[in-house]
Image (tube, rainbow, N blue to C red):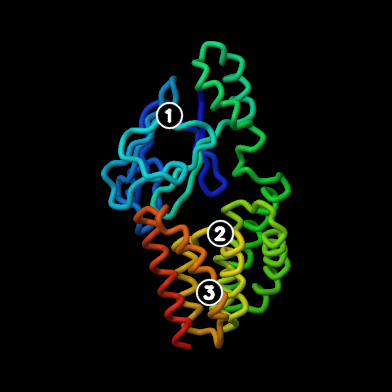
Amino acid sequence: MPFRLRYMQHDMRLSEGEFAVGRSATCQLSLDDPLVSRRHAVLTVSSEGVRIEDLKSRNGVLVNGRRIDTIVDLHPGDRILIGGQEMMLVQTRAEARADHIASSALPKMTLSRLEAVPPAIQDADVEPSMARRADGFRVLGSVAEKALAMGRVEEAERLLASALSEVIEACRAGRRVPMSLTEDAGRFAARLATATNRGSWAEYVIEMYTLQGRLMPGQVIDELYSAFRKVTSVDVARLREYVELLRVQLPRFGPADRFLFQRIEGLERLAGLR
C-alpha cells in the first residue's frame, strides 16, 4: 500500500521502513524551523500502513489538530503538524483505486475511512484552479524574490500586485485557498510592507489570515515584525480583531501554536506603540 507525504506542494514517496522528520540533516525530511527538534518524529511505513511517533520532541506532534502521546496510525488525508510545518499523508488516484479493489479483505471500519477521503479531494481539499494558482504564484514569486534581492522594489511590487489581489479576493469570496498559497502570499505581502514602508501590505496579511481563521506561520510573523518597525501606520483595530479571533481558539492550541499566538500578541503591542 504505497503512500506519499505531501509538504509544500511536494510529494515524497514513503518506502517501507522509517522516515524521520526533524531539524537534523540526517532526517529524511529536514525542516528549517526553530520549533522543530533535531529528531522530532518518525513515520514507520509497512505493508499494513503508516504509523507516526513523537520522539519526545519539545513542541509535540499534532495529527488532525490533536496532540499525540502514543504511536498513532495514519490514514490518507490526515494532517500532521510538526513545529510550524504542516504536511499530509496522501495517495495518488491510481494507488487509491488499487487499494479499493483489494478492500474486500479489509475490516469494515478501515474500509469506510478510506472511502471517506476520495482521491479527488486529497490535494488539500481545494478546487483544481486554486491548486494551479498556487503553482503559478510560486514561479512568479521566484522572479519577484530576485527583484527584491537586487533592490528593485517597484518591479517586485508590480509583478506581485495582481496575483496578491486574486488571492485576497478568493479569501473574501470564501473559496478554499491552499495553505502553501496563503503562506507565499502572506510572506511576500509582508516583505513588500518592509520594502515599501507601506502599512497597507501588512494589513493585507492580517486580513487574509483573519478571513481564513488561521494562525500565521513563524516566517510570516518574522517578516511582519520587520515591517512593523518600518511602516508609517497599521490598522491596529484590524490586528486586534485577528488576535481576538485566535484567542477564542486558544484552548485547542498546542505548545507550538501557543508560541505563535504569543508572538502575534507581541505584534499587537508593537503596533500600539506607533
The residue that mark 2 highlights is: 213
The residue that mark 1 highlights is: 50
Q: Nearer the viewer, mark 1 or mark 3?
A: 3
Cα separation, mark 2 vs mark 3, equals 13 Å
Q: Amino acid at mark 3?
A: Leu
Q: Position of residue 21 (x, y in %)?
A: 37, 43
Note whether residue 123 is visible. Answer: yes
Q: Amino acid at mark 2?
A: Gly
Q: Position of residue 6 (x, y in %)?
A: 52, 41
**Residue occupying image coordinates x 41% and y 44%:** 66
The residue that mark 3 highlights is: 239
- Closer-to-camera residue (165/270): 270
Per the image, label 1 sits on a secondary structure element best described as strand
Cα separation, mark 1 vs mark 2, equals 30 Å
Q: Position of residue 39 (x, y in %)?
A: 30, 45
Q: Nearer the viewer, mark 1 or mark 2?
A: 2
Q: Of label 2 and label 3, which has the lower sequence position?
A: 2
In the image, is 261 to the left or to the right of 205?
Answer: left
Above or below residue 95? Residue 135 is: below
